Image (cartoon, helix red, strand yellow):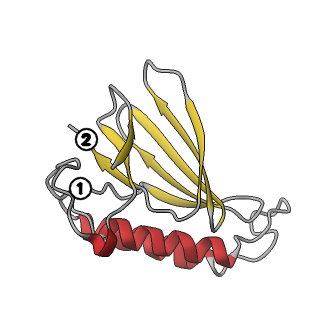
């Protein structure tokens, strides 16, 4: 299982997700977050509300989020939720050119996953005291944002 993580942030990307949501005995371990189901539900609700946005939703000419990008984000969040070590996004955000953004913000990190099309995510990770990292993943969105030890 591949992973990307920061030395200071205690958060990482683990991928690919296992088939059928099985727990990985060699993957990161963490206790489920308190009220985690509520957090996951809030993220899904936010993504569902994005479907109702029309062009110029921000009053400055922004394009409505692409339905395919919203659907992919919902499927990805639902898949991540199946893993007890998964960290729910802090919030979903509509982009201005049809993309869907998922943000994770912790005490010492900020992680952004920008779904620019259903098969591509542009990532940005900012960690206190480290250079900001940018990368792109293509294909299935089978990455899990998780706490790492």
Query: Where residue 38 appears, x then y in whole percent?
Result: 29, 70
Out of 89 and 12, give the one closest to the viewer. Answer: 12
* Figure quadrant of the C terminus: top left
Under circle 2, the secondary element is loop
Q: Nearer the viewer, residue 81 or 109?
A: 81
Secondary structure beneath dot 1 equals loop
Residue 6: image location, x then y, percent: 38, 31
Q: Residue at x 21, y 64 (%)?
A: 35
> Looking at the rendered structure, which numbered label has been put on residue 61?
none
Task: Name the residue beneath numbered marker 1.
Answer: 85
Q: Is residue 110 found left or right of 58 in the rendered image?
A: left
Q: Residues within 10 Å of mark 1 (few under 14, many from 20)?
A: many
Left or right: where does residue 73 sit relative to residue 9? right
Residue found at x 75% / y 63%: 58
- Can you give x and y, in whole percent of width and height, for residue 104 in the image? 43, 48
- State whether residue 130 is above or below residue 121: above
Looking at marks 1 and 2 on the same chain, the residue that comes earlier in the sequence is marked by 1
| Above or below, 132 relative to 1 | above
Above-or-below relation of 37 to 86: below
Q: Residue furthest top?
A: 129
- What is the x, y in percent for residue 81? 32, 68
Q: Is residue 116 above or below residue 52?
A: above
Determine which residue is flagged by label 2.
Answer: 148
**Residue under the image location 80 percent in, 67 percent down:** 63
Left or right: residue 32 versus residue 54 is left
- The answer to the question of whether label 1 and label 2 lie on touching residues, with beta carbons closer than 8 A, is no
């Amino acid at each position: 299982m591949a992973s990307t993580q920061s030395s200071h942030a205690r958060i990482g990307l683990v991928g690919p997700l296992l088939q059928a949501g099985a727990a990985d005995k060699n993957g990161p371990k963490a206790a489920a977050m308190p009220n985690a189901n509520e957090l996951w539900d809030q993220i899904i609700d936010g993504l569902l509300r994005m479907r109702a946005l029309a062009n110029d939703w921000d009053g400055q000419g922004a394009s409505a989020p692409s339905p395919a990008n919203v659907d992919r984000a919902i499927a990805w969040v639902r898949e991540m939720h199946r893993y007890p070590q998964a960290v729910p996004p802090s919030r979903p955000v509509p982009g201005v050119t049809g993309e869907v953004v998922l943000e994770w913000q912790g005490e010492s990190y900020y992680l952004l996953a920008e779904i620019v099309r259903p098969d591509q995510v542009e990532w940005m990770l900012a960690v206190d005291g480290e250079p900001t990292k940018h990368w792109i993943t293509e294909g299935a969105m089978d990455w899990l944002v998780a706490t790492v030890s």
